[in-house]
Amino acid sequence: MLEIKNLHASVEGKEILKGVNLSIKPGELHVIMGPNGAGKSTLANVLAGREKFEVIKGELKFNEISLIDMLPEHRAGEGMFLSFQYPIAIPGVNNMYFLKAAVNSVRKYRGKDELDAVTFLKMIREKLKVVELDDSFIHRPVNEGFSGGEKKRNEILQMISLEPTLSILDETDSGLDIDALRIVAEGINNYRNDDRAFILITHYQRMLNHMEPDFIHVLMDGKIVKSGSKELAHKLEEKGYSWI
Amino acid sequence: MKTDEKKIIDNAVNQDYKYGFVTDIEQEKLPPGLDESVVRFISKKKGEPEWLLEYRLKAFNHWKTLIEPDWALVNYPEIDFQSISYYAAPKPKEKLSSLDEVDPEILETYNKLGIPLHEQKMLANVAVDAVFDSVSITTTFREDLAKSGVIFCSFSEAVKDYPELVKQYLGSVVPYTDNFYAALNAVVFSDGSFVYIPKNTRCPMELSTYFRINAANTGQFERTLIIADEGSHVSYLEGCTAPMRDENQLHAAVVELITLDNAEIKYSTVQNWYPGDKNGKGGIYNFVTKRGACRGVNSKISWTQVETGSAVTWKYPSCILQGDRSVGEFYSVAVTNNMQQADTGTKMIHIGKNTKSTIISKGISAGKGQQTYRGEVKIMKNAENSRNFSQCDSILIGDQCGAHTFPYIDIRNSTAQMEHEATTSNIGEDQLFYCNSRGVSTEDAVSMIVNGFCKEVFKELPMEFAVEAQKLMEVTLEGSVG
């Protein structure tokens, strides 16, 4: 469903990705690891279509459609989702209003009817249970004053509400305590099925204790330098990136 | 009364009022310039009593000694006050037979604002189908108000029919000595509205709906006087969300509010005058003096304003809290886009004991817009246990606009409590991308963020207007990002 071929991308004129190749099929969970500054977040942002990340050359296709000139909101409509490493606060906008706008925007894009307030609320209450948050959570302003764990759980709440087929999770495990980590991991696991794929960007092996990845990739200096099975993550944890 | 029914009635009444204005004045315009003969001409034309002419003349003599204020943070070419014509009878607009004849661009804006079709017709001056007997409906409306003893009429009518009330209160809150534009208004004011709510009366309807469309015809030098007698209550709305074009560039209105013991006035404004084009050409100068006096104990005056129009805005709706335990409120959303400039805020003067004031000001700047919050909180020596809460927030869209805050605080009583909060933020690329990545377009994201920012003020508006005000923001800020 996702084909990345020889992808080069830059931020503010500086080339960060220097020829990334990656192919993802429905149902797969790919983990991307790598040292700081290797280009992991750049890859996530390029995939989601952030304007200041510029594709210099290469191919980027999602379900056979080129993403290169596609607006980020359309990518979301097509079924992509980016869970932010640092979710952004939007003061004054309540979480429910935001979620409803988001859900209805992608529904509209996908040719489905928009949900009315009652149906939406019912749906959200179900999803809130998954991330173990209570109703009051959705009445707070988006990410404002949220703890680290709440922010990441909110990202997962958004993910399961927007129903993407490809979710890119950028360090969703960082800054989480043990309970939050379990909740986030379960959220992802429950959402997994044969049609849905994931890219998990992480520094740590610990998240992987909770899930079954199909592939581990190591991104260094803008390229994927090594790919392997779950074992690779253990090895990296043990020996560090210099081992490669 | 059902809403639909009420609307029909309101429209009919408005229509009648509108025509009432035009028919009894001949088509006339004075040559530019202002001297004593002009003042006399206006007064005579309006058939005013001697005392009002004297008032105008005194104001004129005073005005001549004043110079235009220049302390506001706004720039505009010098105004030649002798090049303005101070009397022009309103021209009857050309009647159109259907909406098809209206400029499609204007219709599109109406649609975006969600203005109902029959109101669009009124606004665009299209003849409305005479499916109802407008005369009888007008009568019903008038009867309704009359039954409760509420007086609501044009200022000119009030001068004729209720001279004692006008004489007693005119200039008692905003004297002609107050400032340059207030003096000018006192000299040449054309017309305006007069409201009197008798003792222990709750005005049976929002005067807002009544005024909705009529407001499109407000004059250049408008004068409004609202008196809420003991224990009464009224909600009044001035203006309209629909864009308003006017040939007069300078607008200098005066609004005076008076509340006696236990009375309350809620005054809401939606101002959407022509702001000029993208390069700042044209546009209205809106130099308004609005002030309310809480004369009685436990009385309350609440100002709510949504200011999106005009090239230059100079406006400080204020409250003088004379009565003990009186309450003043100011809720404001002001938007400056393109080349618009606004210097706006409020004054809260605490004189009585245990008086309380609240200031919530939300400024939004986009394009090359410049915006200033200027506010004064003054707590006088005898105002024991007075309290003020002020919150002034600014939001910037883009990197070429400006927001400025000038809070003046003058406390002369040590028991006073003051709180002042101020924030400035911008709509960041990160916020927009966050929304985009959740499927929300940039335009929707901006309006969502801006509406979230203005929420506290919008909730003070009459319901139907809160919705329109939200849409008005969207229309005003259209294309301000990206």
Image: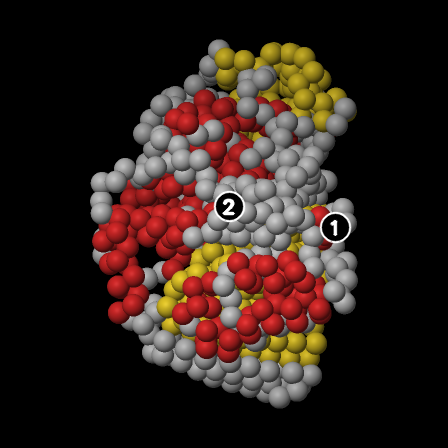
Percent x, y for residue B127? Answer: 34, 37
Choose between B204 and A149: the one closer to the eye. B204
Instruction: Write down the chain letter for disc 1.
Output: B
The residue tagged with tag 2: helix, strand or loop?
loop
| Pointer 2 residue | B27
Q: Which quarter of the rendering shows the C terminus of chain B?
A: top right
Nearer the observer: mark 1 or 2; the answer is 2
Q: Same chain for the residues at labels 1 and 2, yes or no? A: yes
Left or right placement of residue B299 versus residue B9 in this view: right
Q: Is residue B42 above or below residue A21?
A: below
| Pointer 1 residue | B80
Left or right placement of residue A234 versus residue B128 in this view: right
Q: Amino acid at mark 1?
A: Asp
Q: Is residue A13 above or below residue B236?
A: above
The residue tagged with tag 1: helix, strand or loop?
loop
Choose between B87 and B289: the one closer to the eye. B87
Question: Which residue does the image show at 26% across and 51% down from the upper left?
Answer: B135
Quadrant of the image occupied by residue B128? top left
Percent x, y for residue B227? Answer: 45, 72
Percent x, y for residue B264? Answer: 43, 72
The mark tally for this picture is 2
Q: Amino acid at mark 2?
A: Gln
Mark 1 to mark 2 CA distance (whole Å):
25 Å
Question: Which residue does the image show at 53% across and 68% down from the upper left?
Answer: B256
Q: Earlier in the sequence, mark 1 or mark 2?
A: 2
Residue B88 in view in this figure: yes
Question: Which residue does the image show at 67% across and 28% down from the upper left?
Answer: A52
